[in-house]
Amino acid sequence: MSPTEKTLRWAVEKWLAPTPATPARVVRFCRTQMHRRYVCVEAMGPRGLLSIFFFRHDDGSWHVYPPAQVRPAMTVRRTAR
């Protein structure tokens, strides 16, 4: 695993801090129309049930924000004379 790669477990522990008394559980695992993976994880917090969506990025890391969309781009090439 590269130093920049964040696992789903790392992201869940960072954002939800589950414990044996208040475990986190995956309630939804899906793909978007663009074949991007996302997971919804729930855990009980001090103010009640908390649901967070985690999105898988192209480098294999998981974040709470979706990856940037790949957009069409044009490039300029110089030809040799």
Image (cartoon, rainbow, N blue to C red):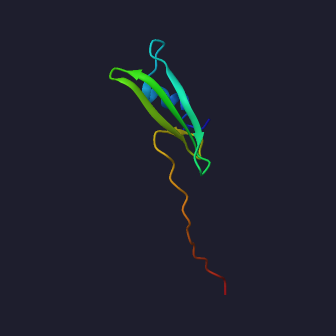
Quadrant including the N terminus: top right
How many marks the image carries: the answer is 0
* Above-or-below relation of 65 to 48: below
Residue at (59, 45) in percent of width and height: 59
Residue at (46, 39) in percent of width and height: 64
Residue at (55, 33) in percent of width and height: 28
Q: Residue furthest top?
A: 21
Asked where in the image residue 31 lies, by quadrant, the reply is top right
Quadrant including the C terminus: bottom right
Residue at (47, 27) in percent of width and height: 42
* Left or right: where 17 falls relative to 28: left
Residue 26, x across and y down, in percent: 54, 27
* Above-or-below relation of 30 to 25: below
Asked where in the image residue 74 lies, by quadrant, the reply is bottom right
* Above-or-below relation of 36 to 16: below
In depth, the one of 65 and 30 nearer the eye is 30
Q: Residue furthest left?
A: 47
Residue 5, x across and y down, in percent: 56, 38
* Above-or-below relation of 58 to 80: above
Residue 55, x across and y down, in percent: 52, 41
Q: Residue furthest bottom?
A: 81
Asked where in the image residue 51 lies, by quadrant, the reply is top left
